[in-house]
Image: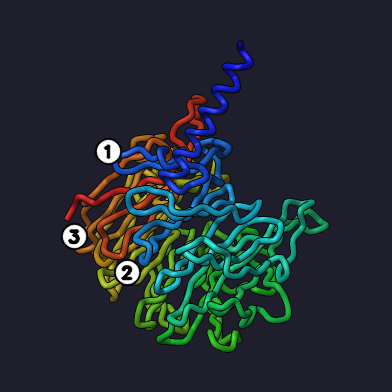
Amino acid sequence: MSKLKGYLALIILVISWVALYWLTGSRTPWQEFAAGTGDKGISIHLGDIPTQNYDRMGFTKAVVRYAKPEQGWIVGTERGEIFLFDSKGKQLWKRTLGIGKLVSLCMSNAGDVAFVGEQSPEGKLYAISSHTGDILWQHKSSAYIGSDPSQRSYPSVVHIVVDKKDNIYANSYRFLMTKDGVRAYNARMLAVAKNGKMLWQFPQQEAMDSWINWCDVNDANGRVVISTSAYDYRSDMHYKDTLYFIDKKSGLSIGSTFVPPVPPFENTVMRGSPNFSRDGKYLAAACSDGRGFLFDDKGKILWERFVSKPTQVDEAWINASGRDGYVTDYGVIFSTINTYNRENWQLPTPVEHPSCNSVFVFDIQGKYCYQFRAEGTMEELGFADKFMACAVGRNVRTHNYKAHGGLVVDLETGKQVDFFPTEGPCQAIAISDDGKQVAGVEAPAVTPKGKIIGAYRLHIWQRRGE
Protein backbone atom coordinates (compact mmCIF):
# COMPACT_ATOMS: atom_id res chain seq x y z
CA MET A 1 0.00 0.00 0.00
CA SER A 2 2.83 2.40 0.93
CA LYS A 3 4.55 1.63 -2.40
CA LEU A 4 1.32 2.49 -4.24
CA LYS A 5 1.10 5.82 -2.40
CA GLY A 6 4.70 6.57 -3.39
CA TYR A 7 3.99 5.88 -7.08
CA LEU A 8 0.84 8.01 -6.87
CA ALA A 9 2.78 10.93 -5.34
CA LEU A 10 5.42 10.65 -8.07
CA ILE A 11 2.76 10.65 -10.81
CA ILE A 12 1.11 13.74 -9.27
CA LEU A 13 4.52 15.47 -9.11
CA VAL A 14 5.23 14.75 -12.79
CA ILE A 15 1.77 15.90 -13.86
CA SER A 16 2.24 19.11 -11.82
CA TRP A 17 5.59 19.76 -13.47
CA VAL A 18 4.14 19.21 -16.96
CA ALA A 19 1.23 21.54 -16.18
CA LEU A 20 3.54 24.26 -14.84
CA TYR A 21 5.90 23.82 -17.80
CA TRP A 22 2.94 24.25 -20.14
CA LEU A 23 1.86 27.40 -18.27
CA THR A 24 5.26 29.05 -17.88
CA GLY A 25 7.46 27.60 -20.64
CA SER A 26 10.22 27.12 -18.05
CA ARG A 27 11.95 23.82 -17.26
CA THR A 28 12.31 25.10 -13.67
CA PRO A 29 8.82 26.54 -13.30
CA TRP A 30 9.03 26.87 -9.51
CA GLN A 31 11.39 29.78 -10.14
CA GLU A 32 8.48 31.66 -11.63
CA PHE A 33 6.93 31.75 -8.18
CA ALA A 34 10.11 32.57 -6.25
CA ALA A 35 9.64 36.30 -6.65
CA GLY A 36 8.02 38.17 -3.81
CA THR A 37 6.12 41.36 -4.54
CA GLY A 38 4.61 44.18 -2.56
CA ASP A 39 5.34 47.72 -1.37
CA LYS A 40 9.04 46.87 -1.07
CA GLY A 41 9.27 45.92 -4.74
CA ILE A 42 9.99 42.57 -6.34
CA SER A 43 12.43 40.09 -4.81
CA ILE A 44 13.90 37.07 -6.64
CA HIS A 45 16.12 34.44 -5.03
CA LEU A 46 19.37 33.92 -7.01
CA GLY A 47 20.41 30.62 -5.45
CA ASP A 48 22.36 29.53 -2.40
CA ILE A 49 25.92 30.74 -1.85
CA PRO A 50 28.34 30.55 1.09
CA THR A 51 27.43 33.16 3.70
CA GLN A 52 30.43 35.30 4.57
CA ASN A 53 31.46 37.10 7.74
CA TYR A 54 30.06 40.63 7.86
CA ASP A 55 33.42 42.17 8.81
CA ARG A 56 35.69 40.39 6.32
CA MET A 57 37.61 42.45 3.79
CA GLY A 58 36.51 40.76 0.54
CA PHE A 59 32.77 40.17 0.26
CA THR A 60 30.06 38.64 -1.90
CA LYS A 61 29.63 40.27 -5.30
CA ALA A 62 27.14 40.38 -8.15
CA VAL A 63 26.63 42.39 -11.33
CA VAL A 64 23.43 43.89 -12.75
CA ARG A 65 22.65 46.11 -15.75
CA TYR A 66 19.53 47.29 -17.57
CA ALA A 67 18.91 45.73 -21.01
CA LYS A 68 16.87 48.37 -22.83
CA PRO A 69 15.63 46.28 -25.82
CA GLU A 70 14.31 43.65 -23.42
CA GLN A 71 12.95 46.17 -20.90
CA GLY A 72 14.58 44.02 -18.24
CA TRP A 73 17.62 43.28 -16.13
CA ILE A 74 20.73 41.20 -16.84
CA VAL A 75 22.13 39.72 -13.61
CA GLY A 76 25.40 37.83 -13.10
CA THR A 77 26.19 35.93 -9.91
CA GLU A 78 29.01 34.34 -7.93
CA ARG A 79 27.56 30.97 -8.95
CA GLY A 80 28.63 31.60 -12.57
CA GLU A 81 25.00 32.03 -13.64
CA ILE A 82 23.57 34.84 -15.74
CA PHE A 83 19.85 35.70 -15.96
CA LEU A 84 17.46 37.98 -17.77
CA PHE A 85 14.45 39.13 -15.75
CA ASP A 86 11.72 41.37 -17.07
CA SER A 87 10.61 44.48 -15.18
CA LYS A 88 8.10 42.42 -13.17
CA GLY A 89 10.67 39.86 -12.07
CA LYS A 90 9.78 37.06 -14.50
CA GLN A 91 12.80 34.99 -15.51
CA LEU A 92 13.11 35.07 -19.30
CA TRP A 93 16.27 32.98 -19.53
CA LYS A 94 19.16 31.61 -17.50
CA ARG A 95 22.60 30.34 -18.47
CA THR A 96 25.38 28.71 -16.48
CA LEU A 97 28.62 30.04 -17.97
CA GLY A 98 31.22 28.03 -16.09
CA ILE A 99 32.74 27.24 -12.72
CA GLY A 100 33.88 30.77 -11.88
CA LYS A 101 32.36 33.93 -10.43
CA LEU A 102 30.91 36.61 -12.69
CA VAL A 103 32.62 39.85 -11.64
CA SER A 104 32.05 42.41 -14.41
CA LEU A 105 29.28 43.33 -16.84
CA CYS A 106 28.87 45.95 -19.55
CA MET A 107 26.08 46.34 -22.12
CA SER A 108 26.55 47.23 -25.77
CA ASN A 109 25.28 50.67 -26.77
CA ALA A 110 22.01 49.26 -28.13
CA GLY A 111 21.70 46.82 -25.22
CA ASP A 112 21.53 43.77 -27.50
CA VAL A 113 24.75 42.18 -26.17
CA ALA A 114 26.05 41.74 -22.63
CA PHE A 115 29.81 41.57 -22.20
CA VAL A 116 30.62 39.54 -19.09
CA GLY A 117 33.86 38.91 -17.23
CA GLU A 118 34.56 36.07 -14.84
CA GLN A 119 37.12 35.00 -12.25
CA SER A 120 38.06 31.38 -12.87
CA PRO A 121 41.04 29.21 -13.87
CA GLU A 122 40.53 30.50 -17.43
CA GLY A 123 39.15 33.98 -16.64
CA LYS A 124 36.84 34.19 -19.63
CA LEU A 125 35.42 37.26 -21.33
CA TYR A 126 32.00 36.44 -22.85
CA ALA A 127 29.64 38.11 -25.29
CA ILE A 128 26.04 37.07 -24.53
CA SER A 129 22.90 37.80 -26.55
CA SER A 130 20.62 39.76 -24.22
CA HIS A 131 17.59 38.39 -26.08
CA THR A 132 18.35 34.66 -25.97
CA GLY A 133 21.22 34.24 -23.51
CA ASP A 134 23.29 32.47 -26.18
CA ILE A 135 27.09 32.78 -26.03
CA LEU A 136 28.19 34.68 -29.14
CA TRP A 137 31.93 34.37 -28.48
CA GLN A 138 34.44 34.02 -25.66
CA HIS A 139 38.11 34.67 -24.94
CA LYS A 140 40.33 33.21 -22.21
CA SER A 141 42.29 35.89 -20.36
CA SER A 142 44.50 33.08 -19.01
CA ALA A 143 46.04 32.95 -22.49
CA TYR A 144 47.38 36.48 -21.92
CA ILE A 145 48.18 36.67 -18.19
CA GLY A 146 48.51 33.01 -17.21
CA SER A 147 46.85 31.00 -14.45
CA ASP A 148 48.10 28.93 -11.51
CA PRO A 149 45.33 26.89 -9.84
CA SER A 150 47.88 25.41 -7.39
CA GLN A 151 48.17 28.87 -5.79
CA ARG A 152 44.53 29.79 -6.49
CA SER A 153 45.99 32.47 -8.75
CA TYR A 154 43.00 32.79 -11.05
CA PRO A 155 42.69 35.48 -13.75
CA SER A 156 39.79 37.91 -13.44
CA VAL A 157 38.22 40.15 -16.07
CA VAL A 158 37.51 42.89 -13.56
CA HIS A 159 36.22 45.82 -15.60
CA ILE A 160 34.76 46.26 -19.09
CA VAL A 161 33.91 49.37 -21.12
CA VAL A 162 32.80 49.91 -24.73
CA ASP A 163 33.22 52.71 -27.25
CA LYS A 164 30.55 53.96 -29.64
CA LYS A 165 31.32 51.17 -32.13
CA ASP A 166 30.94 48.56 -29.36
CA ASN A 167 34.62 47.71 -29.33
CA ILE A 168 35.30 46.20 -25.92
CA TYR A 169 38.16 47.18 -23.60
CA ALA A 170 38.63 44.84 -20.67
CA ASN A 171 41.06 44.80 -17.75
CA SER A 172 42.30 41.37 -16.69
CA TYR A 173 44.67 40.56 -13.85
CA ARG A 174 45.68 37.96 -11.31
CA PHE A 175 47.67 37.87 -8.09
CA LEU A 176 50.63 35.56 -7.72
CA MET A 177 53.30 34.78 -5.14
CA THR A 178 56.97 34.98 -6.08
CA LYS A 179 59.52 32.40 -4.94
CA ASP A 180 60.58 34.68 -2.07
CA GLY A 181 57.00 34.94 -0.81
CA VAL A 182 56.25 38.44 -2.16
CA ARG A 183 52.84 39.18 -3.68
CA ALA A 184 53.05 40.23 -7.31
CA TYR A 185 50.67 40.87 -10.23
CA ASN A 186 50.14 39.96 -13.88
CA ALA A 187 47.78 42.23 -15.82
CA ARG A 188 46.78 43.20 -19.33
CA MET A 189 44.08 45.11 -21.16
CA LEU A 190 42.34 43.25 -23.99
CA ALA A 191 40.64 45.12 -26.85
CA VAL A 192 38.04 43.08 -28.77
CA ALA A 193 35.64 44.01 -31.58
CA LYS A 194 31.92 43.39 -31.11
CA ASN A 195 32.18 40.34 -33.40
CA GLY A 196 34.83 38.79 -31.16
CA LYS A 197 37.94 39.65 -33.20
CA MET A 198 40.93 40.41 -30.97
CA LEU A 199 42.14 43.93 -31.83
CA TRP A 200 45.13 44.31 -29.52
CA GLN A 201 46.49 43.70 -26.06
CA PHE A 202 48.32 46.11 -23.81
CA PRO A 203 51.16 45.74 -23.19
CA GLN A 204 51.89 43.85 -26.40
CA GLN A 205 55.02 41.93 -25.40
CA GLU A 206 54.63 41.42 -21.65
CA ALA A 207 52.17 41.49 -18.78
CA MET A 208 52.03 44.54 -16.52
CA ASP A 209 53.50 43.91 -13.06
CA SER A 210 50.75 45.93 -11.41
CA TRP A 211 47.14 45.43 -10.41
CA ILE A 212 44.80 47.20 -12.86
CA ASN A 213 41.26 47.43 -11.56
CA TRP A 214 39.66 50.17 -13.68
CA CYS A 215 39.66 51.59 -17.20
CA ASP A 216 37.65 53.93 -19.40
CA VAL A 217 37.45 54.87 -23.09
CA ASN A 218 36.37 57.99 -24.92
CA ASP A 219 35.62 58.46 -28.63
CA ALA A 220 36.03 62.24 -28.56
CA ASN A 221 39.72 62.03 -27.65
CA GLY A 222 40.43 58.53 -29.01
CA ARG A 223 41.99 57.40 -25.74
CA VAL A 224 41.79 54.53 -23.33
CA VAL A 225 42.99 55.03 -19.76
CA ILE A 226 44.07 52.38 -17.24
CA SER A 227 44.65 53.07 -13.54
CA THR A 228 46.95 51.02 -11.32
CA SER A 229 45.99 49.66 -7.90
CA ALA A 230 49.07 47.91 -6.54
CA TYR A 231 48.97 48.04 -2.75
CA ASP A 232 52.15 45.93 -2.63
CA TYR A 233 54.43 48.47 -4.26
CA ARG A 234 58.05 47.55 -5.01
CA SER A 235 60.94 49.67 -6.26
CA ASP A 236 61.78 47.10 -8.95
CA MET A 237 58.33 47.26 -10.55
CA HIS A 238 58.34 48.24 -14.22
CA TYR A 239 54.83 49.75 -14.34
CA LYS A 240 55.01 52.27 -11.48
CA ASP A 241 52.88 55.08 -12.88
CA THR A 242 49.31 55.74 -11.75
CA LEU A 243 47.65 56.26 -15.14
CA TYR A 244 48.47 54.82 -18.56
CA PHE A 245 46.99 56.30 -21.74
CA ILE A 246 46.57 54.16 -24.87
CA ASP A 247 45.54 54.96 -28.43
CA LYS A 248 42.27 53.07 -28.73
CA LYS A 249 42.83 52.19 -32.41
CA SER A 250 46.42 50.97 -32.31
CA GLY A 251 46.76 49.86 -28.70
CA LEU A 252 50.04 51.78 -28.40
CA SER A 253 51.03 53.79 -25.34
CA ILE A 254 50.66 57.57 -25.72
CA GLY A 255 51.72 58.62 -22.23
CA SER A 256 51.41 58.05 -18.51
CA THR A 257 50.99 60.04 -15.30
CA PHE A 258 52.60 59.42 -11.92
CA VAL A 259 50.65 60.78 -8.94
CA PRO A 260 53.00 61.07 -5.93
CA PRO A 261 51.69 59.42 -2.73
CA VAL A 262 50.93 61.28 0.49
CA PRO A 263 51.88 60.14 4.01
CA PRO A 264 51.33 57.65 5.51
CA PHE A 265 50.89 55.88 2.15
CA GLU A 266 53.67 54.48 -0.04
CA ASN A 267 51.73 54.42 -3.31
CA THR A 268 48.79 56.12 -5.00
CA VAL A 269 46.02 53.57 -5.62
CA MET A 270 42.92 53.99 -7.82
CA ARG A 271 40.30 51.23 -7.62
CA GLY A 272 36.99 52.56 -9.02
CA SER A 273 38.19 55.30 -11.35
CA PRO A 274 39.16 57.25 -13.46
CA ASN A 275 36.33 58.06 -15.85
CA PHE A 276 36.27 60.51 -18.75
CA SER A 277 33.73 63.28 -19.18
CA ARG A 278 31.37 62.74 -22.08
CA ASP A 279 33.21 65.32 -24.25
CA GLY A 280 36.57 63.70 -23.44
CA LYS A 281 38.11 66.91 -22.07
CA TYR A 282 38.31 65.81 -18.44
CA LEU A 283 39.11 62.77 -16.33
CA ALA A 284 37.97 62.31 -12.71
CA ALA A 285 39.60 59.94 -10.25
CA ALA A 286 39.47 59.16 -6.54
CA CYS A 287 42.43 57.63 -4.69
CA SER A 288 42.44 55.27 -1.74
CA ASP A 289 44.36 57.90 0.24
CA GLY A 290 41.27 60.15 0.16
CA ARG A 291 42.19 62.54 -2.65
CA GLY A 292 39.98 63.44 -5.59
CA PHE A 293 41.57 64.61 -8.86
CA LEU A 294 40.43 66.27 -12.03
CA PHE A 295 42.83 65.72 -14.94
CA ASP A 296 42.76 66.89 -18.52
CA ASP A 297 42.50 64.25 -21.25
CA LYS A 298 46.30 63.81 -21.34
CA GLY A 299 46.64 63.21 -17.61
CA LYS A 300 47.72 66.68 -16.46
CA ILE A 301 46.37 67.47 -12.97
CA LEU A 302 43.97 70.44 -13.14
CA TRP A 303 43.07 70.34 -9.44
CA GLU A 304 43.00 68.01 -6.46
CA ARG A 305 40.94 67.97 -3.27
CA PHE A 306 41.20 65.96 -0.06
CA VAL A 307 37.69 64.55 0.36
CA SER A 308 38.93 62.29 3.16
CA LYS A 309 42.17 63.35 4.82
CA PRO A 310 44.19 60.68 6.67
CA THR A 311 44.05 61.54 10.36
CA GLN A 312 45.97 60.21 13.38
CA VAL A 313 43.71 59.45 16.35
CA ASP A 314 45.05 57.70 19.48
CA GLU A 315 48.22 56.75 17.57
CA ALA A 316 46.20 55.09 14.80
CA TRP A 317 46.01 56.43 11.26
CA ILE A 318 42.38 56.34 10.10
CA ASN A 319 40.89 57.23 6.77
CA ALA A 320 37.86 56.70 4.55
CA SER A 321 39.20 55.26 1.32
CA GLY A 322 38.29 57.10 -1.88
CA ARG A 323 37.00 54.99 -4.76
CA ASP A 324 34.73 56.38 -7.52
CA GLY A 325 35.32 59.41 -9.72
CA TYR A 326 32.89 60.72 -12.37
CA VAL A 327 32.37 63.89 -14.40
CA THR A 328 28.65 64.49 -14.90
CA ASP A 329 26.48 67.36 -16.11
CA TYR A 330 25.76 68.02 -12.43
CA GLY A 331 29.32 68.15 -11.15
CA VAL A 332 32.48 66.18 -10.51
CA ILE A 333 31.72 63.29 -8.16
CA PHE A 334 34.00 61.42 -5.77
CA SER A 335 32.97 58.67 -3.36
CA THR A 336 34.42 57.24 -0.14
CA ILE A 337 33.82 53.96 1.68
CA ASN A 338 34.13 52.70 5.29
CA THR A 339 36.55 54.11 7.87
CA TYR A 340 39.60 51.90 8.15
CA ASN A 341 42.77 51.56 10.19
CA ARG A 342 45.93 52.13 8.11
CA GLU A 343 47.80 49.32 9.91
CA ASN A 344 45.16 46.71 9.12
CA TRP A 345 41.76 47.16 7.49
CA GLN A 346 40.07 44.88 10.02
CA LEU A 347 41.51 46.47 13.17
CA PRO A 348 39.07 48.70 15.09
CA THR A 349 39.17 52.49 14.79
CA PRO A 350 38.57 54.94 17.65
CA VAL A 351 35.93 56.87 15.66
CA GLU A 352 34.32 56.96 12.24
CA HIS A 353 35.99 59.33 9.81
CA PRO A 354 33.59 62.26 9.10
CA SER A 355 34.10 61.76 5.36
CA CYS A 356 33.26 58.04 5.27
CA ASN A 357 30.52 56.43 3.15
CA SER A 358 29.95 59.64 1.24
CA VAL A 359 29.63 61.25 -2.16
CA PHE A 360 31.29 64.64 -2.64
CA VAL A 361 30.29 66.93 -5.49
CA PHE A 362 32.37 69.80 -6.92
CA ASP A 363 31.86 72.04 -9.90
CA ILE A 364 34.23 71.75 -12.86
CA GLN A 365 36.48 74.50 -11.42
CA GLY A 366 36.85 72.55 -8.18
CA LYS A 367 34.46 74.55 -6.01
CA TYR A 368 32.85 72.40 -3.29
CA CYS A 369 29.09 71.92 -3.75
CA TYR A 370 27.95 69.37 -1.16
CA GLN A 371 28.51 66.06 0.63
CA PHE A 372 25.90 63.32 0.76
CA ARG A 373 26.58 60.73 3.44
CA ALA A 374 25.00 57.28 3.68
CA GLU A 375 25.04 54.98 6.71
CA GLY A 376 27.01 52.24 4.94
CA THR A 377 29.49 51.77 2.12
CA MET A 378 28.31 52.89 -1.31
CA GLU A 379 29.29 49.70 -3.13
CA GLU A 380 28.31 50.91 -6.59
CA LEU A 381 26.91 54.00 -8.30
CA GLY A 382 24.61 54.15 -11.33
CA PHE A 383 23.40 57.21 -13.24
CA ALA A 384 20.30 58.25 -15.21
CA ASP A 385 20.36 61.97 -16.02
CA LYS A 386 20.21 63.82 -12.67
CA PHE A 387 19.53 60.71 -10.60
CA MET A 388 22.29 58.70 -8.96
CA ALA A 389 21.48 55.21 -7.65
CA CYS A 390 23.68 53.90 -4.82
CA ALA A 391 24.05 50.36 -3.48
CA VAL A 392 24.46 50.75 0.29
CA GLY A 393 26.31 47.82 1.81
CA ARG A 394 28.10 47.15 5.08
CA ASN A 395 29.24 49.52 7.77
CA VAL A 396 31.89 47.45 9.52
CA ARG A 397 32.34 50.11 12.22
CA THR A 398 28.77 50.73 13.42
CA HIS A 399 27.10 47.46 12.27
CA ASN A 400 24.02 49.47 11.39
CA TYR A 401 22.07 46.80 9.54
CA LYS A 402 19.22 49.20 8.77
CA ALA A 403 21.58 51.10 6.46
CA HIS A 404 21.48 48.37 3.79
CA GLY A 405 19.56 48.99 0.60
CA GLY A 406 19.30 50.99 -2.60
CA LEU A 407 19.00 54.75 -2.47
CA VAL A 408 18.55 57.41 -5.13
CA VAL A 409 19.99 60.93 -4.90
CA ASP A 410 18.95 63.97 -6.95
CA LEU A 411 22.30 65.39 -8.09
CA GLU A 412 20.82 68.87 -8.62
CA THR A 413 19.82 69.22 -4.97
CA GLY A 414 22.03 66.66 -3.24
CA LYS A 415 18.96 65.23 -1.54
CA GLN A 416 17.82 61.63 -1.18
CA VAL A 417 14.60 61.01 -3.10
CA ASP A 418 14.20 57.23 -2.63
CA PHE A 419 15.40 54.53 -0.25
CA PHE A 420 14.67 50.82 -0.64
CA PRO A 421 15.82 48.80 2.41
CA THR A 422 17.30 45.30 2.19
CA GLU A 423 17.97 42.94 5.07
CA GLY A 424 21.49 42.04 3.96
CA PRO A 425 24.07 44.40 2.41
CA CYS A 426 23.21 45.70 -1.07
CA GLN A 427 26.26 44.87 -3.20
CA ALA A 428 25.32 45.93 -6.75
CA ILE A 429 22.92 48.38 -8.35
CA ALA A 430 21.74 49.75 -11.70
CA ILE A 431 19.09 52.23 -12.80
CA SER A 432 16.99 52.12 -15.98
CA ASP A 433 17.73 54.64 -18.72
CA ASP A 434 14.58 56.63 -17.92
CA GLY A 435 15.38 56.64 -14.19
CA LYS A 436 12.05 55.07 -13.25
CA GLN A 437 13.22 51.65 -12.08
CA VAL A 438 16.15 50.48 -9.97
CA ALA A 439 17.58 46.99 -9.51
CA GLY A 440 19.91 45.89 -6.72
CA VAL A 441 21.47 42.64 -5.54
CA GLU A 442 21.48 41.80 -1.84
CA ALA A 443 23.94 39.39 -0.21
CA PRO A 444 23.66 37.34 2.99
CA ALA A 445 26.07 37.90 5.87
CA VAL A 446 26.94 36.46 9.28
CA THR A 447 26.98 39.15 11.96
CA PRO A 448 29.59 39.18 14.76
CA LYS A 449 26.90 37.66 17.00
CA GLY A 450 26.51 34.71 14.64
CA LYS A 451 23.15 35.70 13.15
CA ILE A 452 22.59 35.26 9.41
CA ILE A 453 20.95 38.27 7.81
CA GLY A 454 19.72 38.64 4.26
CA ALA A 455 19.87 36.32 1.26
CA TYR A 456 21.33 36.29 -2.25
CA ARG A 457 18.53 37.92 -4.20
CA LEU A 458 17.69 40.47 -6.84
CA HIS A 459 15.39 43.35 -5.99
CA ILE A 460 13.51 45.39 -8.57
CA TRP A 461 12.13 48.67 -7.26
CA GLN A 462 9.81 51.22 -8.83
CA ARG A 463 10.94 54.71 -8.00
CA ARG A 464 8.52 56.90 -6.07
CA GLY A 465 10.51 60.12 -5.83
CA GLU A 466 10.44 62.95 -8.37
Q: How many numbered marks appear? A: 3
User: Looking at the picture, which amino acid does disc 2 mark?
Assistant: Val
Q: Position of residue 20 (x, y in %)?
A: 44, 39
Question: Seen from this angle, which residue lies furthest right?
Answer: 179
Mark 2, residue position: 332
User: Would you call the spot at circle 2 few (<14 residues within 10 Å), some (14-19), or many (20 or more)?
Assistant: many
Mark 3, residue position: 413
Give the CA distance from mark 2 to mark 3. 14 Å
* First-in-chain label (3 vs 1): 1
Label 2 vs label 1, nearer the camera: 1
Left or right? Give the position of 439 relative to 144.
Answer: left
Residue 80 vs residue 330, the one in the foreground: 80
Left or right? Give the position of 324 relative to 239.
Answer: left
Q: Position of residue 238 (x, y in %)?
A: 69, 74
Question: Seen from this angle, which residue lies furthest top?
Answer: 1
User: Would you call the spot at circle 1 few (<14 residues within 10 Å), some (14-19), or many (20 or more)?
Assistant: few
User: Looking at the picture, which amino acid does disc 3 mark?
Assistant: Thr
Residue 312 vs residue 291, the one in the foreground: 291
Mark 1, residue position: 38
Left or right? Give the position of 449 relative to 250.
Answer: left
State the residue at coordinates (18%, 60%).
413
Q: Which mark is residue 375?
A: none
Give the CA distance from mark 2 to mark 1. 36 Å
State the residue at coordinates (45%, 38%).
19
Q: Position of residue 163 (x, y in %)?
A: 46, 79
Could you tell me which quadrant the C terminus lies in?
A: bottom left
* First-in-chain label (2 vs 3): 2
Quarter-of-image position of residue 143? bottom right
Residue 376 vs residue 340, the one in the foreground: 376
Give the CA distance from mark 3 to mark 1. 29 Å
Q: Secondary structure at mark 2?
A: strand
